[in-house]
Amino acid sequence: MIVISGPSGSGKDSVLRSLRARGLPLHFVVTVNTRSPRPDEKDGVDYVFVSNARFDEMKANGELLEDAKVYNDFKGVPKEQVQEAMASGKDVLLRLDVQGAATIREVVPDAILIFLTISSEQKLLERLKSRKTESEADLALRLETAREEFKRVDEFDYVVVNREDRLDDAVDKIVAIIGAEHQRVHPRKVEL
Amino acid sequence: MIVISGPSGSGKDSVLRSLRARGLPLHFVVTVNTRSPRPDEKDGVDYVFVSNARFDEMKANGELLEDAKVYNDFKGVPKEQVQEAMASGKDVLLRLDVQGAATIREVVPDAILIFLTISSEQKLLERLKSRKTESEADLALRLETAREEFKRVDEFDYVVVNREDRLDDAVDKIVAIIGAEHQRVHPRKVEL
């Protein structure tokens, strides 16, 4: 189980899209999310977009491996989807915010946690501003959260810097990490 | 510090030659050896070939990071060469027999130990026999040693199977391991 995490604006979505294009035997877990889709997002592909009521129901039924409030929305990892993917023999890849990654570490101690980051806070600011999908207040909250998240790199196994115009380098590094983990004499154990 | 080890006949020399051709920023440590060079081996490149007397002197002077008796010969890792390579900022790569790798683990606990192996003992036998540089008695000793060495994979960090006609795959895996180790949040520490 591989978790790709990092502050908002570190480029998780771009990295995952590029990683998907490599055609590796990976299952990309589609998490559930209560926020509204952005214009380029597809339901069931980027996230499973659900109502707050449905989310509460899933949580109450124990259908979520991990769940968290992110800004004013709720996200969660559907346990059954992860179990099915693992049963099929694939590596399972999760895209999670830093808070979610920390929770996964508790639930699945042997998960591989990769912290994706960019070279400076200034670049993060520019990237978040250019997104233009958030209100000023949302953006301020997101930036403050990102600042706090930057400090939590110590809780991760690997760090990958996603440099401007070097997306492929970041993806190469993630592919190398996954490859190396497969060569471990004492493999990590994931039990759900 | 990366140690590539494995039983005799597992293809360490071929893998290292191919790895060298990739032009990575690696220093390939040239170990000292008291045996006679094989026809294709060059002094100072494959090993530094030394007399037993010179070897004893180096050992007595503390010039060897690790030393071992292998079959009827002596091998050792020159400490100064390793220190100089590390000071230059390169990764240091050592080719060692299994006994030597185990000793390095004691001296440098954070060294990365890679166990190179082949798919079966039968293939190992064939490979060693085809070498035709050893007497029957030497071959028997080498085979017995290899059988014992196969059992010590547990002492290593990574295992890479060097399949017949798939040398590049094995080298790719070693490159991935080295790449992944560079992304660790908490890097290994090597102090000599």
Image (cartoon, coloured by chain):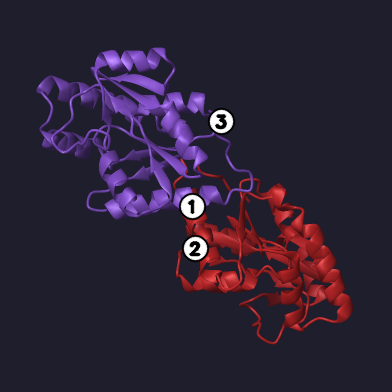
Chain colours: A red, B purple
Q: Is residue B67 above or below residue A79?
A: above
Please name whichever residue, B42 or B98, is drawn nearer the observer in this view of the structure: B42
Q: Amino acid at mark 3?
A: Glu
Q: Is residue A76 above or below residue B157?
A: below
Q: Position of residue B98 (x, y in %)?
A: 36, 28
Which corner quadrant holds the N terminus of chain A? bottom right
Q: Measure the C-alpha gap from mark 2 to mark 3.
A: 29 Å
Which labelled disc corresponds to residue A146? none
Q: Amino acid at mark 1?
A: Gly
Q: Amino acid at mark 2?
A: Asp
Residue at the image point whose x is 17% and y is 34% from the top: B128
Which labelled disc corresponds to residue A172? 2
Mark 3: few, some, or many residues within 10 Å (few <14, many ≥20)? few
Kindly report which numbered mark, 2 or 3, lies closer to the viewer in this rendering. Answer: 3
Q: Name the secondary structure under disc 3.
A: loop
Task: Give the letter of the chain under mark 2.
Answer: A
Mark 1: few, some, or many residues within 10 Å (few <14, many ≥20)? some
Q: Which residue is mark 3?
A: B191
Q: Name the secondary structure under disc 2.
A: helix
In terms of sequence position, does the residue under pointer 1 or pointer 3 come before the other? 1
Are callouts 2 and 1 both on one chain? no
Q: Measure the C-alpha gap from mark 1 to mark 3.
A: 21 Å
Tags 2 and 3 in contact by the CB under 8 Å rule?
Answer: no
Q: Which residue is mark 1?
A: B179
Residue A164 left/right relative to A8: left
Residue at the image point whose x is 51% and y is 29% from the top: B108
Q: Name the secondary structure under disc 1.
A: helix
Please name whichever residue, B46 or A187, is drawn nearer the observer in this view of the structure: B46
Q: Measure the C-alpha gap from mark 2 to mark 1.
A: 9 Å
Q: Is there any visible trace of residue B29 in the rendered image? A: yes
Q: Is there any visible trace of residue B154 in the rendered image? A: no
